[in-house]
Image (cartoon, coloured by chain):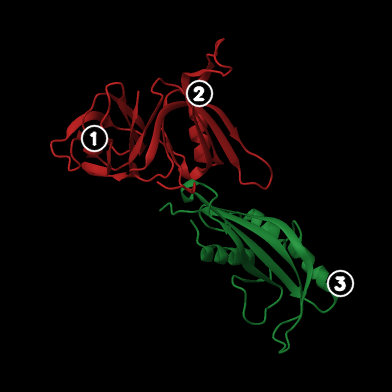
Amino acid sequence: MATLGEIREAIKETLEENIPGIKCYRYIPENALVLPAIIVEPEMASFVEAMGRGTDRWDFTLLVLVGYNHLESAQNNLDPFVSGHGNKSIREVIFQNKTLGLENVNATVERVYDYGMRFAPDTQGRATEALGARLGLTVYTRGYSTG
Amino acid sequence: MSSLVLVDVTTYVGEFNLTTKMNSLNLNIQADELDATTFGNNGFRTRVAGIKDVMADLSGYWEDDVDNEVFGSLGVAHDAVTISPTGVEGDTAYLWRGEKFTYQAFGAIGALTPFSVSMSGSHNQGVARGTLLKKQGTVTSTGATGTAFEISGGIGSDAALYSHFHVFDAGTTVTAVIESADNDEFEDATTIATHSALTAVGANIQRVAGPITDEFFRVRVTAITGSFSVACAIGVGV
């Protein structure tokens, strides 16, 4: 089985190793982001997928953000990350690395949504203005140790 | 036992533990419903029970080892089937011999690959109801193992005790016996069934005809060489 922490770390490593120049945060960061960035957010878990803790399901939101100076150029920078294929495609990287380097794990990017989200700096200017989108990532793992 | 959230239904079929591959199980035990209504019956039907049957529909997530097991045993009669709603030693178990007649695999895009298997009873053993004496676990030495079970009143003369001994991983050889006693300390215990010299994965079934006046039963390994992963259940049937 893989723990939540192991899955978060594996997502981060998989994406950073395969997408040039991306910074992936396994936790929601407290401070300003280095862009472009992907933030791993656990959304939902199901522990009743199979009898005897056979399978657990984790649904993650991958929030992908790019710098925002100009709306059209920001979209131009965001599109490769949410595309179905290409050297920056998050979907393609996960498709080619379904196990995330872990045992008994199967990961799939199922959808893109909330394209065009905008993030503005707070009153202390502690964030960078960004344009983003969300991807739904589903990860199945054993619910028990095979060791 | 109170109401039960169904998360640990344990299913052993021969040498295979399907439990963690499955997310649904329907066990159907029935008797044919024969209409015996006659004229002059006060306007109501009369029914009697006919031949009994047992069937099970198992479904879950397809994996290579599931496919290997089910594909290889499709249409092979008399698989030893042990089903426990909890997988806990001492809890209820159903014992029967079945044959896989239908195997379905794969489904829609985006879903975790499913499978389903339909089994039907294939032996006049019918269904025995009892308990899981030992859930799947490793044994490497002789001695009593698992949890003893009390059958109040013993086994009647019109009934029989069935024992399923499943071997999931085999060492060199193992022999296990079912012992009965009139006390829960198993003083002066009697060997009533022997699962003898098992050397490979699979399942061994023993039947002991009633009457058995003893009320306490357990499984004991009497000889073993190597390490075995085993489970054992007993039940009362016909």
> Which quarter shows the C terminus of chain B?
top left
Mark 1 surroundings: few (<14), some (14-19) or many (≥20) residues within 10 A: some
Q: Which residue corresponds to mark 1?
A: B215
Helix, strand or loop for disc 1: loop
Which sits in the foreground, A5 or B136?
Answer: B136
Q: Which residue in the protein does label 2 denote?
A: B75
Image coordinates for residue B169, horizontal then vertical, percent: 36, 40
Q: Give the chain ID for the green colour.
A: A
| Quadrant housing residue A100 | bottom right
| Distance from the alpha carbon under mark 3 to that under mark 1 | 81 Å
Q: Residue furthest left?
A: B188
> Drawn colour of chain B?
red
**Are the residues flagged by discs 3 and 2 from a single subunit?**
no
In-image side of B168 versus B66 (left or right) = left
- Which of the numbered marks, if any, corresponds to residue A72? 3
Q: CA distance from mark 2 to mark 1?
A: 37 Å
Q: What is the spatial separation of the Cα atoms under label 3 and label 2, in whole angstroms?
A: 63 Å
Labelled pair 3, 2 in contact (Cβ < 8 Å) = no
> In the rendered structure, which disc, 2 or 1, sits on the residue that comes first in sequence?
2
